[in-house]
Amino acid sequence: MLLDPHVQDLLFREARTAHVFTDEPVDDERLAAVYELVRWAPTSFNQQPLRVMLVRSDEARRRLVPLMWDSAQARTAAAPLVAVLAADLDFHEYLPEQFPVFPQAKDVCFSNDDARVDSAVLNAAIQIGYFILGVRAAGLAVGPMTGFQADKVSAEFFPDGRHRALVVISMGRPGASAWFDRLPRLPYDRVFTSC
Amino acid sequence: MLLDPHVQDLLFREARTAHVFTDEPVDDERLAAVYELVRWAPTSFNQQPLRVMLVRSDEARRRLVPLMWDSAQARTAAAPLVAVLAADLDFHEYLPEQFPVFPQAKDVCFSNDDARVDSAVLNAAIQIGYFILGVRAAGLAVGPMTGFQADKVSAEFFPDGRHRALVVISMGRPGASAWFDRLPRLPYDRVFTSC
């Protein structure tokens, strides 16, 4: 690996899903720096379907908390910043601009609704992987959560009906006793096979 | 950002989707080192649904190439290594071992087929994001491809019927003229919104 051990620790080995944060806020400038970096990582047809709703107001937070599953409500209420990460299911509108080498892709590849939604979800999720590592690279801890009423969160935070909420993420500086014991990971030979 | 500029370049800014590779092979040891690092990044309920089929034999490569869309066939045929990245749709079988803090999650959260498949695809895609950056961190270039007949690739390379192929990825050292011009990325204010 070409990464120094301390970078490997920062991104993967010592980074942990945080359940408790300090009160230090997470400002837009830091998130913009994260995005400015991670946006260069690849997506299919350069489609970039990820959209991020930062839940900053107390009023918006009060709308989100009851839509989370029980175990995630307290964490969602307490984190310095939570965001709803969603896929823009109509990302193809921007393809002629984002993928000018084949502007017809908008219609040729993505006029079928099912194919387009599948692609939006797949690529937004890949981008969520990039984003999680990017937030860690900014020195913050993340707490990704998928336990929520997705249809209601989508409708509440993206009322235009063209987005699907995929992950709610909490972010901030880890507080005292911020994480649980490390859970096991599958070994290489249970994940990789050759043919 | 806590990453040195050269690491930011390695992972994001100068790393590019490669279409041409040298003949240098990619061995299992390097992939195991990548996986050993990226496997620590988070998934929902620690479910880790990503599975990787390394297409190493000429015979297997010949089965894969015709299932790729036209534009991806030559790249799939020529890369030093291609792999099919898939979601294990029955990942929940391993949850009591991987998520021992709530072993009932296997049945309580994932006995519903639709919810389980959605979770497998979402989390495997997030892991694909981690994996792409991990391969880059090992000094290799990647060429992720989603243009293929997914049902046929799933059936051909995961005949047990419990996996869904999501991305085919080529890997190796970038060759001469390995990439096209950089495509544009959406600016921060078109991706992030506050409420």
Image (cartoon, coloured by chain):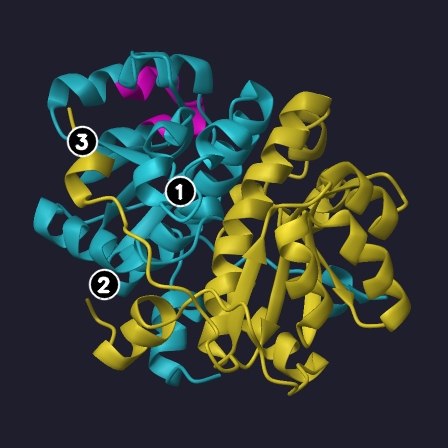
Chain colours: A yellow, B cyan
Q: Vertical placement of B55 versus A147: above or below?
A: above
- In the image, the segment drawn in magenta is B64-73
| Chain under numbered label 3 | A
| Chain under numbered label 2 | B
Q: Vertical placement of A171 versus A128: above or below?
A: below
Specify whether A186 is left or right of A22: left
Secondary element type, mark 2: loop
Circle 3 sits on which residue? A193
Residue in the foreground of this view, choosing between B124 and A75: A75
Q: CA distance from mark 2 to mark 1?
A: 16 Å
* Chief secondary structure of the magenta portion: helix
Which residue: 42% across, 55% down?
Answer: B42
Question: Which amino acid type is marked by label 3?
Answer: Thr
Which label belongs to residue B182?
Answer: none
Circle 2 sits on which residue? B139
Residue in the foreground of this view, choosing between A172 and B50: A172
For residue B66: magenta? yes
x%, y% of residue B13?
45, 70
Circle 1 sits on which residue? B144
Question: Which amino acid type is marked by label 2?
Answer: Gly
